[in-house]
Amino acid sequence: MFTPFFAALALMIILFDGGLGLNFDKVIGQMGPSFFIGVGTQITSIVTTAIITFFVFNDILIALIMGAIVAGTSGTIVVSLVQRMNVSEETKTVLTIESVVTDVLIAVIVIILIEFKLSGSGNYLVAAQSLISAFAIAVFIGLLFGILWLKTLTFFYGKPYAFMTTLAALFLLYTIVEILHGSGAMAALVFGFVLSNDKEIARMFKMKSSFVFDEKIKQFQGEITFFVRTFFFVYLGAMFVLPNPSDEFFIIFLLSTLMIVLAMVAGRYAITFLAIRRYSVLKKDSTAIWTMMPRGLAAAVLATLAVSRLVDLPDITKTLIINYSFMVIVLTCIVATIGTFISERKNRETKSVPLNQIEKPLQKN
């Protein structure tokens, strides 16, 4: 009952924290590879998952909805992991932007597909307009609100409760954007990004007044983010129900779930391979990039949303949507964990170069 509300709160807090950790120059430089990997991974995930689950649901729209639900990497998990990984700043920025963009994209896509299913018909032009509108509203209002709040923070510098007032402003921003049918999550990201890049924003808009942003806000935000993230995943674990092994659908469910995850891994690997050929700066962190595919917050929320909106679906279909979503979340998180371990070990081995390898070139001279 309260899952959609708490999930929206968690997503807002996490993406605001992600925005605070983004550097303006690096974001501009890594926008291309972020969209290449993010959109490419989404397309392959939606298509492969829809093909596999079509034989289970026997309904192409439900299969597409299922594919879209589990198509995006979780900003909640990715932002937390990459900030602690021993990878380049370019890779951190690419993976952060990718996860944030896909979180927003899949939410819009799932909502459009649900409305299409409910109405029985649809207009693809209207769907595209809804997608563009959600992004445009969020970016514009988030940017404007962020600039206004930077001016306000100048008066709060060095005073207590500056973070609490900023958090209140974040809630207000999210509410305004959602009322205007924009993406509150994207607005939260833009808001945090503007606050963290005050000097660049002032230079970009040629503002004479200097902004003052208290770095203690970032520290408090990190603590709040840790609490929200931890509480959410405990709550998520409590909601998960393993299917009954005696159920006739259990074997089909188990095999199809493994096929979905394997298809996601293969698709992610292929997209990463193409991205590295195009953006060579990412080559040294290839393992981290292609295994950084955890699903989480958005998938759980959208699965719940789909089941609650599509009330005419058979109970077995609703159960399968929930169970597929949670199993994919668990398995992709395991893949990301293993990939992180392997990537970190490879980076440590690369940095510890044996002395005899350094001496050989000297001996030739």
Image (spheres, helix red, strand yellow):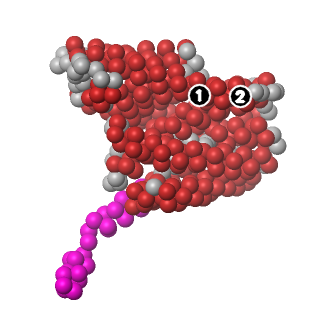
Q: Is residue 140 above or below residue 342?
A: above
Q: Which of the two residues, 225 or 318, is positioned nearer the viewer here?
A: 225
Quarter of the view holding residue 106: top right
The residue positioned 28% from the left and 14% from the top of the image is 152
Tell me which amino acid carries mark 2. Leu
Residue at numbered disc 1:
132
Tell me if residue 331 is in the magenta stretch: no
The residue positioned 81% from the left and 27% from the top of the image is 121
Residue span colored magenta: 338-365
Q: Are marks 2 and 1 in contact (CB under 8 Å)?
A: no
The residue positioned 69% from the left and 40% from the top of the image is 66
Determine which of the numbered discs, if any, sits on residue 125 in the image.
2
Neighbourhood count class around disc 2 (C-alpha, 10 Å): few under 14, some 14–19, many 20 upward? few
Point out residue 304 in the picture as x, y percentages from the top left corner: 63, 30
Kind of element beneath mark 1 = helix
Q: Is residue 50 above or below residue 151?
A: below
Quick one: label 2 or label 1, which is nearer the N terminus?
2
Q: Which of the two residues, 224 or 166, is positioned nearer the viewer here?
A: 166
